[in-house]
Image: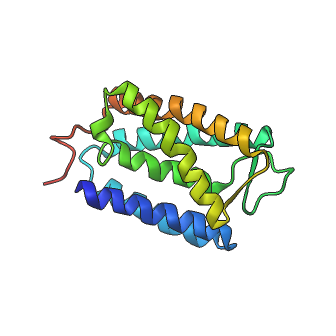
């Protein structure tokens, strides 16, 4: 799959989920993201391994986002303050994120320091953008951003490492001919 195409599909799916959640159309936004995940899976050589990576990202994302909610540092659109688990549309975004790991983000593999820095910077930036679009609300701005930065500094290299271990597909063998 083309790197730019993969990157663009992720951003279309991200925007669909975020705007969908912010406008009470999270099912519609999530459906678009699931369709884009299916397009990705159709184009990989080793679907089973890629599904393992997507599944691992879903588990990690659900756990992480639920932990953030439990601290009451932020809340997500469509959730109440008493909501104790991550919303489905956000978990689908984690699956969508996993589709970039072996394609448009493959260049970061084995560049652990860079992955830590990129996670620490761009993870929170995505949440800031999500807040501006109305999908997330920071209840404790400072703590939420610190937690997001620290969390993504760990999660980004973790998911890259998992991709290496699962070996969903290599850069040279990853695309169907």
Quadrant of res 4: bottom left
Residue at horizontal 27 percent and vertical 50 percent from the top: 44
Residue 50 location (% of width, % of height): 36, 43
Where is the C terminus found, in terms of image quarters? bottom left
Is residue 127 positioned above or below 111 on the image? below
The answer to whether any part of residue 7 appears in the image is yes
Residue 172 location (% of width, % of height): 15, 40
Quadrant of res 164: top left
Coloring scheme used: rainbow
Residue 121 location (% of width, % of height): 50, 41
Question: Could you tell whether 72 is left or right of 25 in the image?
Answer: right
For this orientation, the residue located farthest to the front is: 142
Is residue 41 positioned above or below 50 on the image? below
Is residue 30 positioned above or below 146 on the image? below
Residue at horizontal 31 percent and vertical 42 percent from the top: 102
The number of numbered badges drawn on the structure is 0
The answer to whether any part of residue 66 appears in the image is no
Residue 148 location (% of width, % of height): 62, 39
For this orientation, the residue located farthest to the left is: 177
Where is the N terminus found, in terms of image quarters? bottom left
Judge by depth and name the residue closer to the eye, 154 or 118: 118
Question: Could you tell whether 16 is left or right of 157 in the image?
Answer: right
Residue at horizontal 53 percent and vertical 44 percent from the top: 123
Judge by depth and name the residue closer to the eye, 172 or 46: 172
Residue at horizontal 54 percent and vertical 52 percent from the top: 126
């Amino acid at each position: 799959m083309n790197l730019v195409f993969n990157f663009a599909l992720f951003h279309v799916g991200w925007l669909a989920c975020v705007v969908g959640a912010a406008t009470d159309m999270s099912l519609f936004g999530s459906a678009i993201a699931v369709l884009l995940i299916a397009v990705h899976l159709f184009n990989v050589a080793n679907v089973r391994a890629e599904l393992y990576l997507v599944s691992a990202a879903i588990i990690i994302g659900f756990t992480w986002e639920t932990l953030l909610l439990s601290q009451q540092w932020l809340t997500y659109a469509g959730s109440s303050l008493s909501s104790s688990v991550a919303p489905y549309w956000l978990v689908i975004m984690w699956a969508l994120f996993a589709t970039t790991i072996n394609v448009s983000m493959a260049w970061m593999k084995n560049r652990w320091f860079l992955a830590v820095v990129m996670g620490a910077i761009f993870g929170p930036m995505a949440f800031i953008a999500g807040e501006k679009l109305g999908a997330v609300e920071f209840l404790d701005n400072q703590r939420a951003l610190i937690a997001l930065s620290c969390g993504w500094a760990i999660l980004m290299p973790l998911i890259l490492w998992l991709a290496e271990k699962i070996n969903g597909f290599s850069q040279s063998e990853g695309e169907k001919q």
